[in-house]
Each structure stands twice: as structure tokens, then as C-alpha cells.
Amino acid sequence: MKLTNKKYAQALFESVDGKNEKEINVVLKNFTDLLIKNNALAKINKIIEEFNAIWNKKNKIVKATITTAQEIDKSISQSLEDYIKKLSGAEKLEVENKINKDLISGTIIKYGDRILDNSLKTKINNLKIKMISN
């Protein structure tokens, strides 16, 4: 049976969950030895990505990107973060704020596999498509 990155990550997660630092160090050493033995050390970056996804899901951590046309003040940023937490059920939110002047106005929020696009650029493009198709 071939072990996928996700299976390696799940096994690692189950092995470290609830352990103290000393125990985790032993698990990581054994896990690294296993990867070497299975000639799978090249998969480590993908395994770490999968592990982080499992960890975040278990701990209700959501990563989000908020893209705006210009910098927004802290109260608006906090309102958007609260909105994302409510939609996603997250207890903790890791937010990356980006500025994209091409949006003209509005916001694009990405979290998990969802995209909420309320940018003026998208609204204009959707209007163009409607006008062309009519």
C-alpha cells in the first residue's frame, strides 16, 4: 500500500496530538526516520501542508485573505474578520491583508475554498457580460 502525503500527515498528527515537547521530539525523529526508510523525504513539504490543514481544522483555525483597493481602517478590518469567523465557524483567524488597486473599490475575501467577491471591478465585468449577452 502506497502512503499518500495526507496519510503521512494524519499519522503524524495522531502521533503528536496531546503530547508534550519531549514526546513530540521523539515522534518527529521517528517520523523522519520512517520517511528516510520509505524513501519519501522529498514529500516533506507536501506532508507539512497536509499536517497544517489537519491541525487547523481540528483547532478551528481558518486562514483568510482580505483584498481591498486601498488600506482600510482597523474597525472595518475587525468587522470583516468577525464576519469571516461567523461564516466559517472559526475560533481563531489568521488574516493576510492585501491591497490591489485594480479592484477600484470593495473587497475580495478568501477563506478555505470560498471566495466572496464584492469588488467594483467584478461588478463592472458582470455588467459587461450581461450587456453583451442581451
Image: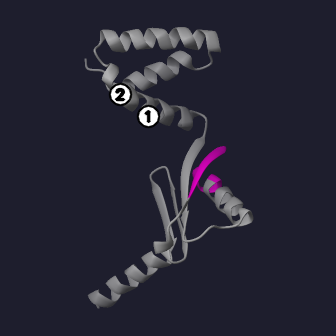
Q: In x, y percent, where is residue 58? A: 57, 33
Name which residue type carries label 1. Answer: Glu
Q: Can residue 90 be seen in this view?
A: no
Q: In x, y percent, where is residue 55? A: 54, 32
Residue 49's disc is 1
Q: Are marks 1 and 2 in contact (CB under 8 Å)?
A: yes
Name which residue type carries label 2. Answer: Asn
Q: Which residue bears the numbered disc 2?
A: 5
Locate residue 54 relative to residue 87 in the image: left or right.
left
The answer to which of marks 1 and 2 sits earlier in the sequence is 2
- Residue 87 lies in the magenta stretch: yes
In the image, residue 25 sits, relative to residue 64, either above or below, namely: above
Number of other residues with Cα within 10 Å of mark 2, as a class: few under 14, some 14 to 19, many 20 or more: some
- Residue 53 lies in the magenta stretch: no
How far apart marks 1 and 2 lie (CA) works out to 9 Å
Colour scheme of the picture? one colour
Magenta stretch? 85-97
